[in-house]
Amino acid sequence: MINPGLRWLLAATALCLAAPLAAQDLETTQVRMHTLPMEQVLDGRIEAVQQATVSAQTSGRVVEVFFDVDDFVEEGDLILRLRDTEQRSRLEQAEAGLREARARYNEARSDYERIEDIFERQLVSRSEMDRATAALRSARARLESAQAAVEGAREELDHTRVVAPYAGILTERHVETGESVSPGQPLVSGISLEHLRVVTQVPQRHIQAVREHQQARVMLNGAMPVSAEGLTLFPYADPVSASFRVRVQLPDGTPGLFPGMFVKVAFAVGEQKRLLVPTEAVMQRGEVSAVYVVDEDGRIRLRQVRTGRAANQDHVQVLAGLEAGERVAVDPVRAGITLKAQREAAR
């Protein structure tokens, strides 16, 4: 029978030998101090860069409306059509005038070429040649005028077909089928979801720092922060709030962001030192955050920490609970299994 004291000694020895061996298989990372932007967080609202109201460019009665509010349209889609009887009639008249002008021009050119030939043989006077030249120039001018009239009539006919200037969502429809419209009257309004930006108001006390650093992150609950592609600062302040309007440009195609949403905008206003750990190394149990710390002897300890904002997509700030130079396990699941094995070996 093994002496109890000897059994404890053997177990302790096994723990000392096994713990470092198990812990050395864990992937760890050293906690380091990093220089991060000091940020001022403000409320902002997302809006579409492209938002417009399409107005009528000719008169007519609305014959068909092909899309309704909240429908998605592709660029070039036919949104509505106006009655085009008058426009087609004007185009036909313009084309008839063009045919007549072309015929008169051809006749004037033939006369000019004929008179030019006999003028070179000195069979007609200079005045006859001048009259033929003037007639040709006049016919050419009438032809060009007729061509312009056809182009204008054709463009007016095209305006009876209202198409989407870009892909997006219809937000308002200002007319119904059967209504008569005139030039300048609003027809439909829409926005594009492709290009978005955030609009916010920056207090006067922060605007100089925001202008100097030109950096911002857009934050939405439950999503990773999105780095701004650029800032546009308006050169004047609101006289009531003493704040400056700032536009924050978002990357195209950012998922989860839509016009009208409220978000948080973190503007860089300085620099600060912060400890960073990999996001995957932090365990979250409700509102409690913890990491597995591995000491120099390979022993693992579960330690509660207080985290701050995400520094980027891969790292999070640690405000309390860790010191620079300590090592934490990157995979908390494996670290937990190893810690359990250490505890069982210590019994």
Image (tube, rainbow, N blue to C red):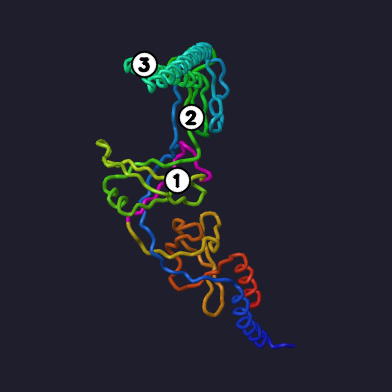
Callout 1 amino acid: Leu
Query: Which of marks 3 and 1 precedes in the sequence?
Result: 3
Element on which disc 3 rests? loop
Mark carried by residue 250: 1
The magenta stretch is: 254-269
Label 1 close to label 3 by CB (< 8 Å): no
Q: Would you name the residue on which mark 2 appears?
A: 190
Q: Is residue 106 left or right of residue 300?
A: left
Q: Is residue 129 left or right of residue 147?
A: left
Residue under the point 59% across and 77% down: 24
Q: Nearer the viewer, residue 216 or 59?
A: 59
- In the rendered image, the quadrant that contains the C terminus is bottom right
Element on which disc 2 rests? strand
Q: CA distance from mark 1 to mark 2?
A: 19 Å
Nearer to us of marks 1 and 3 is: 3
Query: Which of marks 2 and 3 precedes in the sequence?
Result: 3
Callout 3 amino acid: Val
Mark carried by residue 124: 3
Nearer to us of marks 3 and 2 is: 3
Q: Is residue 273 above or below residue 226?
A: below
Label 3 close to label 2 by CB (< 8 Å): no
